[in-house]
């Protein structure tokens, strides 16, 4: 198994007071599919309340749960320290979820994650939880929710069982997001596959978990409520190398609702020595070059996950990214990809939210 490309996604879970963030987090903790979750509770002024709701107990800031999860109560100044602790190999954490305070500014937490210098951490997206029953009142009381929704990579519209007409909430929420996937939910039940790979109990081979995502032999409990029906997924495999310019154009123009892209890309003669692991969540994108193993079959393998996707059209667009097989390649052809390759130990410049790893406009020159 390769270890060089292994990074821990850090998901920021935000939303105003009472939206159901802790309920969503609890659901993820108890339906992680074998993945070990590090949960950071960022609850200013009332650490004990949410931390106890998540962990059931709070001892010396760190609690080890019986199901193998970790919960840390922390304020903003300590966040980087806790991320470093949870990312240590000895912790065995597969994903970190930061539950933001209902009064916190999610943009600042995202900046802190993007600015982390830890090589094992990668930004996993901003998830905004909305209380469907109180959406109009929340919007009137906290107009900044419109900005938060515009920054989100995934929006969970929670408590839909408490409204008589779901479209009266879902439609205005969708009008406020910027290409984010919008997922309806009740009681905080969100399929964890939207946020991270659920690791099976047996040892995995490889980094992609490509087969894991599409296994249909899950237990009956995981099918309760048909959570998987809330999203669409597409598996794309090709033995034909992809053209880097065409792939970047596809990524720059991807449709609303396409939340996650992961897998490996073969760019053929553009880089014959390496395959490129790709990690995209919302508007965030990273490529990680990895040497091909001796005798390894050279394939592009991608998984796309989101809501309301036209999977037939997406497959056709990916097929159109195939290389023409010209004997000579454009020496500048990889510039668009290399924009999103993070050098080891280089956290990048987070700048304004989304600029570090954010997908640029089509045709944007390489940095």
Image (spheres, rainbow, N blue to C red):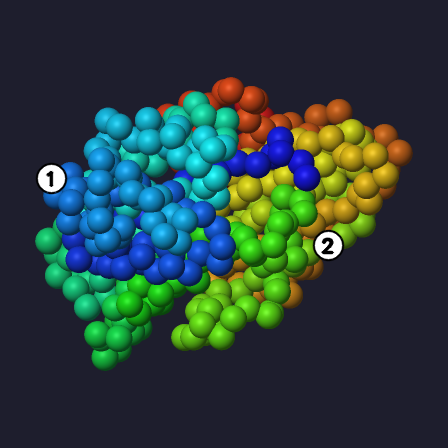
Q: Residue at position x 15%, y 49% from top?
A: 49
Where residue 103 sits: x, y (%)?
Answer: 16, 44
- Which residue is more in the foreground, 15 or 174? 15
Specify few, some or many for label 1: CA neighbours under 10 Å numbering under 14, 14-19, or 20 or more.
few
Q: Quadrant of residue 79?
A: top left
> Is residue 165 shown to the viewer in this render?
yes
Element at label 1:
loop
Is 265 displayed left or right of 192 in the figure?
right
Where residue 252 sits: x, y (%)?
Answer: 55, 43
Where residue 25 sits: x, y (%)?
Answer: 32, 54
Q: Residue furthest top?
A: 345
Where residue 339 sits: x, y (%)?
Answer: 57, 28
User: Vertical placement of 303 versus 339: above or below?
Assistant: below
- Which residue is more in the foreground, 203 or 160? 203
The residue wearing badge 2 is 237
The residue wearing badge 1 is 45
Q: Nearer the viewer, mark 2 or mark 1?
A: 1
């Amino acid at each position: 198994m390769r270890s060089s490309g292994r990074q821990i996604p850090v998901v920021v879970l935000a939303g105003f007071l009472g939206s159901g963030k802790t309920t969503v987090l609890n659901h993820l903790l108890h339906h992680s599919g074998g993945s070990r979750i590090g949960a950071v509770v960022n609850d200013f002024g009332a650490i004990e309340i949410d931390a106890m709701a998540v962990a059931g107990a709070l001892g010396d800031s760190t609690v080890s749960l019986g199901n193998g999860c970790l919960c840390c109560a922390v304020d903003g100044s300590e966040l980087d320290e806790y991320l470093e602790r949870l990312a240590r190999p000895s912790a065995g954490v597969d994903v970190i979820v930061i539950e933001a305070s209902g009064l916190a500014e999610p943009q600042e937490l995202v900046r802190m994650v993007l600015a982390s210098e830890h090589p094992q951490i990668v930004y996993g997206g901003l998830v905004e939880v909305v209380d469907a029953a109180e959406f109009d009142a929340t919007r009137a009381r906290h107009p900044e929710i419109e900005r938060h929704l515009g920054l989100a990579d995934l929006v969970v519209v929670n408590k839909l069982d408490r409204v008589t007409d779901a479209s009266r909430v879902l439609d205005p929420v969708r009008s406020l997001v910027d290409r984010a996937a919008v997922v309806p939910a009740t009681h905080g039940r969100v399929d964890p596959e939207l946020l991270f790979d659920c690791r099976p109990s047996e040892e995995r081979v490889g980094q992609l978990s490509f087969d894991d995502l599409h296994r249909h032999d899950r237990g009956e409990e995981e099918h309760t409520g048909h959570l998987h029906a809330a999203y669409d997924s597409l598996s794309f495999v090709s033995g034909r190398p992809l053209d880097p310019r065409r792939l970047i154009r596809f990524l720059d123009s991807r449709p609303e609702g396409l939340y996650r892209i992961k897998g490996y890309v073969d760019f053929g003669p553009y880089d014959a020595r390496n395959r490129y692991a790709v990690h995209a969540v919302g508007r965030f994108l990273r490529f990680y070059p990895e040497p091909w193993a001796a005798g390894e079959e050279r394939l592009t393998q991608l998984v796309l996950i989101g809501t309301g996707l036209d999977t037939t059209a997406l497959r056709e667009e990916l097929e159109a990214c195939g290389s023409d097989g010209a004997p000579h390649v454009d020496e500048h052809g990889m510039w668009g990809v290399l924009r999103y390759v993070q050098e080891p130990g280089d956290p990048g410049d987070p700048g304004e939210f989304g600029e570090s790893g954010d997908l640029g406009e089509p045709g944007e020159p390489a940095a």
